[in-house]
Amino acid sequence: MKRSGRVRAADVMKSTALLGECLELGSDRVGWAERLNEGLQGLLDAQVVIASELTGLGSGEPDEAVGLWRTGWANADAERRWRDYAAKGPAEQKPEYPVITKMFGRERERGVTLTRDAIWGGTAVWARSRAFNEVHRVCGIDDYIFSIRQMPKAATVSTLWVHRAVGEPGFTPRERRLLALLHDQIATLVGGALASGAEPGLRDLPPRPREVLGYLLKGLSEKEIAAEMGLSKPTVHEHATRLYRHFDASTRAELLARFIGRFPPRPLD
């Protein structure tokens, strides 16, 4: 393997450190997804990173994005243009769609990580394409790597798009392999140590119920939580009841089961 294609020990260490930072935020789907995107920008010297979690693929039902995070646009206009492009037309018209259909076809691959040129058939084809000249170029992005992985839940996938700015050097084989290595690890953890976008989100909770949740996860009773927070026991019980409804739990055991194997949620800043 050429040196440019070899994943170095330093790369693995940085990738492992980023995974650890995501795991520390694992209870918060938005928090760990944002940290992953920011980390990939630095790890791969990328400008724009787009991560999504899709359900329904391969089930015969319409697919749905239960999570979508975009990071790194040069300005609001570039992001708006990209959003318009992404929402326009069915997925079947996008060049990456054959990759998705192959995954859920006879081969049942767990996932692939492809360069832009592998998808488009070469730089020359890409440079002449409408996708580049009418969308990517005006959004300020050019070379990219596309990665898709099957997650533990059936017909659910994780996708990552990592883009370089127009005029920047293209991604190397080493960077493609590094993204594939990290995505392999991330995808197996979603729904377990890493919260899924299909779950009720922590960010939807006000600060007080979220603080009560933190104490519940430490094993405190409602009476003890009231003393810690300087609140009445009925008020704490009201916050706890809200938590049960939010996470669709009937008992404290069911509520706490959602967080088994995860770092406890961090307080809101």
Image: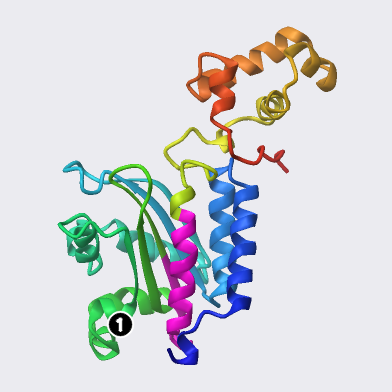
- In the foreground, 190 or 159: 190
Residue type of the residue flagged with mark 1: Asp
In the rendered image, which residue does mark 1 sit on? 117
Q: Is residue 77 visible?
A: no
Answer whether residue 246 is magenta in the image.
Answer: no
Q: Tell me which corner region of the image, top left, top right, bottom left or bottom right, holds residue 217.
A: top right
Q: Residue 45: in sight, yes or no? A: yes
Q: Tell me which residue sits at (73%, 43%) in the image.
A: 269
Identify which residue, 266 or 92, lies in the foreground: 266
Residue 36 is situated, as x and y percent measured from the top left of the image, at: 55, 59
Look at the image and say whether residue 177 sits in the magenta stretch: yes
Q: Is residue 231 above or below residue 166?
A: above
Q: Secondary structure at mark 1?
A: helix
Q: Position of residue 220 (x, y in %)?
A: 75, 20
**Residue at image location 58% in from the left, 33% down from the top:** 259
In this rendered view, identify the residue nearer to me: 151 or 145: 151
Residue at the far top in the pictured view: 234
The residue lying at 19 percent from left, 41 percent from top is 61
Whether 172 is drawn above or below 55: the answer is: below
Quadrant in the picture for the N terminus: bottom left
Q: From the viewer's perspective, is residue 174 above or below residue 193?
A: below
Please give the name of the residue rendered at 66% of the width and 26% of the height, measured from the top-left corner: 213
Q: Which residues are magenta?
A: 161-186
Q: Position of residue 111 (x, y in %)?
A: 32, 61
